[in-house]
Image (cartoon, rainbow, N blue to C red):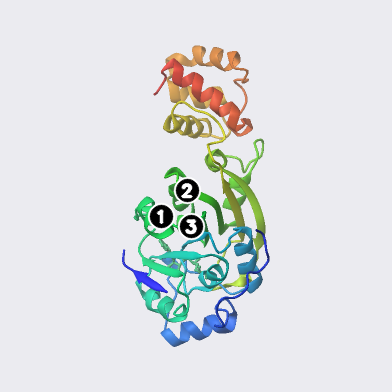
Amino acid sequence: MTTESGSEQAKAPKKSSAPDIGTPRRTKEIIAKHGFSFKKSLGQNFLIDGNILNNIVAAAELDEHKGALEIGPGIGSLTQKLADAAGKVTAVEIDQRLIPILADVLADRPEVSIIHGDVLKLDLKELFQQQFADCAGVSVVANLPYYVTTPILMKLLEERLPLQHIVVMIQKEVAERMAAKPGGKEYGSLSVAVQYYCVPKLVCTVPHTVFIPQPNVDSAVIKLTVRDKPAVDVPDEGYFFRVVQASFAQRRKTLANNLTAFVGKERREELTAMLVRIGIDPIRRGETLSLEEFAVLSRSLYEAGWNS
Ligand code: SAM
């Protein structure tokens, strides 16, 4: 392992004889040996279930030619399994206290590099060039800190990193919102944003008993397969997402009411006529619109030059 500053198979053959880190016993041993104390503020809930770890790694479809970027390796339970499955693993950890622990437990893993840093502040394009230049494909695989799940995922997607899959453990409710279809109460701007860039699939739900310490929310593993190009064609991405946000601004309000606030009261009649013209009933709610309908809507508003 090096440290720096700043196919769906259930199990890959092990490349090292070291015991699994992701068990209750080994995790407690490592924590005791290094006198580690958990920081709730960093979302530190470590996985201690080998089956769940194997399911996460299997969903990422790794092989010896591919790379994995892990965000928040903790004491290395998932990192170790990723090293068995991938040719190159780079893990970014914010907590300086975990760096020597990772160096210790992953000492026999030359394919692993640990970077000390905050993933939200790193230049990920540069990191990809430095770490994964020789890889045939790269996926993000992580048990994410729940307090920053959405900012991390949106950073990965908006920066258009050359990713194949993003397989992450997140809060179950957030996973359901990401995968939601139009028409339900879970469907919102997060669903549209994620599905614009990816095809989501819920892999499994996870009980809170498989973590130390146990989180007080339910968890799920979601697999996001990154699209070669976005799901719909829009003239201006920033504008598209502003229209989506505006459409969900007050969920109980009709589209016409929410969008009037976006384009200005004086344009209400023109707006209503436009909605009718593009085949979207003004009394519908934002939560009923498909991605394609949001694209048509944002294109029409953009061409009219309203709030652009
Ligand atoms: N992967 C380990 C596991 O599954 O047992 C630990 C997962 S724990 C839920 C989240 C990890 O992310 C912690 O190790 C925490 O210190 C780290 N972390 C929190 N915020 C981070 C950030 N902004 N950048 C990088 N790592 C972060």
Mark 2 Cα shell of 10 Å, populated few (<14), some (14-19), many (≥20): some
Determine if residue 46 is in view: no
Mark whose residue sits in front, 1 or 3? 3
Residue matched to label 2 = 162
Mark 1 Cα shell of 10 Å, populated few (<14), some (14-19), many (≥20): some
Whether residues under marks 1 and 2 lie with C-beta atoms below 8 angstroms apart, the answer is: yes
Q: Is residue 302 above or below residue 78?
A: above
Q: Is mark 3 on a helix, strand or loop?
A: loop
Mark 3 Cα shell of 10 Å, populated few (<14), some (14-19), many (≥20): some
- Say what amino acid the circle numbered 2 marks: Pro
Query: In this figure, what is the number of numbered marks?
Result: 3
Mark whose residue sits in front, 3 or 2? 3
Residue matched to label 3 = 135
Where is residue 7 drawn, in percent x and y?
Answer: 65, 58
For marks 1 and 2, the one nearer the N-term is 1
Give me the residue at 55% from left, 12% from top: 273
